[in-house]
């Protein structure tokens, strides 16, 4: 049965690794729903967070294929109930809309969104939450005229997991064997 | 310009990136490499000119030939095979060889020239993004744009290529980095990468579980693959087989890890393998897979594969565990170490009754297939099997057999009686036609004192026939056995069996191979009558230097047994 999985991958900070990792999904016809890459809590080690839908059996095999890559330290996969996760969305709207009507302001407050920038021509609204929540805000703002909309990839932290530092030490020790 | 290096003595010396690269290769122990020059790799060739006495460069006639030659060299020598190619088309011509080496776990380091750094991304002449292109068919790859980074990249490349599960690595070096002068310190080899664990630590608990299963098994079966050869576990494997008394069957990549005549060697697995090991895979109670990866050509329909058996999988690569077949006891680690550790834990045993089942089924295969294949009636055309029988007998099973891909490949592997370790070189995973001629050249350079016989079909021969030029130039002694059925035989067999004999594009309109050989200064003989076969093989094998023996074999002979695609191994057909 297909489910949504979040895969966290810790890699060296080198050119080309993201390509190697994404190719593993492409080859198996698995669409990456979202992707976030950034520095991790360990210096010089990067963390990718990918969201994909597949079967657990397939994901287990994929995680092994990812870990097989020379410059990858470790990869973990989780179902949604095993992680705390968020996404961020930004909405660009004409500033005059906010000044002319209370409706947009009401929607923004109701969704606990916040104004990130107010310029004479446009205003940027920010909302952090689950995809359903940022989408809901989008749907409500849309009739009022959204100029631009962007949503980030997922970032996530797992609930029951050893700290990556611990794995990092283990992998480093194993590589010296 | 020499670097004499010891770890205690740090010498800095200024030289070009190209010269540094050549020095790194020498420090890695490279004495023979294969390649083809071109614009973007010219500085390296210039540097090679200065080191002619230390590194022998074999110029193949196509870069694909260079990769296969390097594969043949690596497979026989156990060292890393090395290739050079220029940018663009030179680099892309390496792709088939890289893919082949990736699937057959062959250690290769391919070095490609690249356009100068400032031109990358401009669609410059002969520019291709070879790092992206080769990513899917390499174990690791890198682009180097600064001369100073060359030694570290080369050291890492060799370490990755040969360690753990070996594989191909590509190092792309921009032309300006090859020209650039930099200060180099003594070259230091790489023996550790912090994110890379090539040899998983043995798990004592798994070894105990495996031993317990082996000791209690009544009908155990060993399947052995390339991992036995790659880990140099010759003694450990033979000791394990003999102590436990378990029948052992091979994948084509495992062939020659145990002599064909060994009483516990029960033959070949898979699609064109032997009847007994295929049938009995679905009857055994414990399946011990040693250094093999359950390729679909071995398993047939995986959903009906060995469901009754407890599976023990000895494997170095964690990603192979449970990939195709679920393992009840995965034993992660280098086969040599795993087998050594298991040897102390397993009991001496014999499985006479179980072995008798193999003999019974072998007799059926012999009656229905082998007898006729090896001894056709006088009025029948020559069979590939009888040719291989003579080759095997006359060479006493001592040759290195390098096969191409197709019917002849299956026949050579089924009927050549391999007496020695590491004597089988073939394209197992990718099934690359055109592999054998250049791979045989590489094998001969790796083992000049052994006889090397390339067994090739008329289709595959023409895919890399230009490599006869290497034989012509270097006088390398490769015996070429051309089994000519004037068809793409394996495809024709499938069309015969599964496409109602609609022979679509399998007829080969062949050239006069004798004339071609003559053009390259290679002596040849063509045999069309059985009476002359044995004598011709005698003169072929005793000929001084390379020669070609073309044997005209039955046009529409099929290779049996066969497991049709999608069938279970126990549905193997004898006819």
Image (cartoon, grey):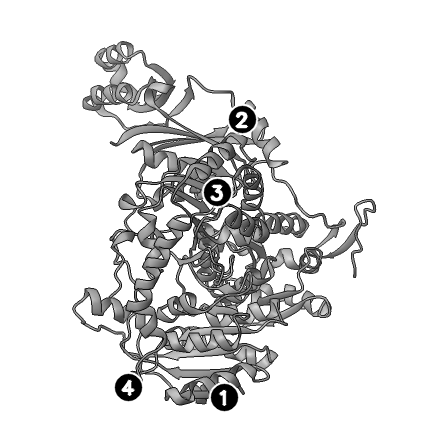
Task: Output the chain of dot 1.
Answer: B
Judged left or right of residue A163, residue B500 is left
The percent coordinates of residue B36 (x first, y second) are: 56, 69
The chain carrying label 4 is: B
Q: How far apart are marks 3 and 4 (CA)?
A: 49 Å
Residue that mark 1 sits on: B519
Q: Quadrant of the C terminus of chain B?
A: bottom left
Mark 3 and mark 1 in contact (Cβ < 8 Å)?
no
Circles 3 and 2 in contact, beta carbons < 8 Å: no
In this view, the mark in front (4 or 1): 4
Residue B339 in the image, given as x and y percentages of width and height: 54, 44
Residue at left 47%, top 87%?
B535
What is the secondary structure assignment of the residue under circle 1? helix
Task: Determine which of the numbered discs, if any, sits on residue B379 in the image.
Answer: 4
Label 2 sits on residue = A167
Given residues B553 and B462, the one toward you in this image is B553
Measured in 3D between alpha carbons, the distance from the residue under mark 4 to the one under mark 1, in whole angstroms, is 35 Å
Q: Position of residue B69 (x, y in %)?
A: 53, 67
């Amino acid at each position: 049965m297909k489910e949504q999985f979040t895969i966290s991958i810790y890699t060296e900070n080198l050119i080309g690794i993201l390509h190697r990792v994404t190719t593993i999904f492409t080859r198996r016809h698995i669409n990456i729903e979202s992707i976030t890459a950034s520095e991790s809590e360990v210096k010089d080690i990067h963390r990718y967070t990918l969201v994909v839908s597949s079967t657990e059996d397939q994901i287990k095999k994929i995680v092994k294929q990812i870990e097989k890559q020379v410059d990858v330290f470790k990869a973990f996969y989780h179902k949604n109930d095993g992680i705390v996760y968020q996404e961020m969305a930004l909405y660009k709207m004409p500033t005059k809309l906010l000044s002319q009507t209370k409706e947009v302001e009401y929607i923004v407050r109701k969704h606990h969104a916040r104004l990130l920038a107010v310029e004479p021509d446009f205003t940027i609204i920010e909302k952090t939450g689950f995809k359903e929540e940022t989408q809901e805000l989008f749907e409500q703002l849309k009739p009022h005229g959204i100029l631009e909309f962007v949503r980030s990839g997922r970032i996530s932290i797992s609930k029951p997991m050893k700290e990556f530092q611990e794995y990092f030490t283990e992998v480093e020790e194993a590589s010296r064997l | 310009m020499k670097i004499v290096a010891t770890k205690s003595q740090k010498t800095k010396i200024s030289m070009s990136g190209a010269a540094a690269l050549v020095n790194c290769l020498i420090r890695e122990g490279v004495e023979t490499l294969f390649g083809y020059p071109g614009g973007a790799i010219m500085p390296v060739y210039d540097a090679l000119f200065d080191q002619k006495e230390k590194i022998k460069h074999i110029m193949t006639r196509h870069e694909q030939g260079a990769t296969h030659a390097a594969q043949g060299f690596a497979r026989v020598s156990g060292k890393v095979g090395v290739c050079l190619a220029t940018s663009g088309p030179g680099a892309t011509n390496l792709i088939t060889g890289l893919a082949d080496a990736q699937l057959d776990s062959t250690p290769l380091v391919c070095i490609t020239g690249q356009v100068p750094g400032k031109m990358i991304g401009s669609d410059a002449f002969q520019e291709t993004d070879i790092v992206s292109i080769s990513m899917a068919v390499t174990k690791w790859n890198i682009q180097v744009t600064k001369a100073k980074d060359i030694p570290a990249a080369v050291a890492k490349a060799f370490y990755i290529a040969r360690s753990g599960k070996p594989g191909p690595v590509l190092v792309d070096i921009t032309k300006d980095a090859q020209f650039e002068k930099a200060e180099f310190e003594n070259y230091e080899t790489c023996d550790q990468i912090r994110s890379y664990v090539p040899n998983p630590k043995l798990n004592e608990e798994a070894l105990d579980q495996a031993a317990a299963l082996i000791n209690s098994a009544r009908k155990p079966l060993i399947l052995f693959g390339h991992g036995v050869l790659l880990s140099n576990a010759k003694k450990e494997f033979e000791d394990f087989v003999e102590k436990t008394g378990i029948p052992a069957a091979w994948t084509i990549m495992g062939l020659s890890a145990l002599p064909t005549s060994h009483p516990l060697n029960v033959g070949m697995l898979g699609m064109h393998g032997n009847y007994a090991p295929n049938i009995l895979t679905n009857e055994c109670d414990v399946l011990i897979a040693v250094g093999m990866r359950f390729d679909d050509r071995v398993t047939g329909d995986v959903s009906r594969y060995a469901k009754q058996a407890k599976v023990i999988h000895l494997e170095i690569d964690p990603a192979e565990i449970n990939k195709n077949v679920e393992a009840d006891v995965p034993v992660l680690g280098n086969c040599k170490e795993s087998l050594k550790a298991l040897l102390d834990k397993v009991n001496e045993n014999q499985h006479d009754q179980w072995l008798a089942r193999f003999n019974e089924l072998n007799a059926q295969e012999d009656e229905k297939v082998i007898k006729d294949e090896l001894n056709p009636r006088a009025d029948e055309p020559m069979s590939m099997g009888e040719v291989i029988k003579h080759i095997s007998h006359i060479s006493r099973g001592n040759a290195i057999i390098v096969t191409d891909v197709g019917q002849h490949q299956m026949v050579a592997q089924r009927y050549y009686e391999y007496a020695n370790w590491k004597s089988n070189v073939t394209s197992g995973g990718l099934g690359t036609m055109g592999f054998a001629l250049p791979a045989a050249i590489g094998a001969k350079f790796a083992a000049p004192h052994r006889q090397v016989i390339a067994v090739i079909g008329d289709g595959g021969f023409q895919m890399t026939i230009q490599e006869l030029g290497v034989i012509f130039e270097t006088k390398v002694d490769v015996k070429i056995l051309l089994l000519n059925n004037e068809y793409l035989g394996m495809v024709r067999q499938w069309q015969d069996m599964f496409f109602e004999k609609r022979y679509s594009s399998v007829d080969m309109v062949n050239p006069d191979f004798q004339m071609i050989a003559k053009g390259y200064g290679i002596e040849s003989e063509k045999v069309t009558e059985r009476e002359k076969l044995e004598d011709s093989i005698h003169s072929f094998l005793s000929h001084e230097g390379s020669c070609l023996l073309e044997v005209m074999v039955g046009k529409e002979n099929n290779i049996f047994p066969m497991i049709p695609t999608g069938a279970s191994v126990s549905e193997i057909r004898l006819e």
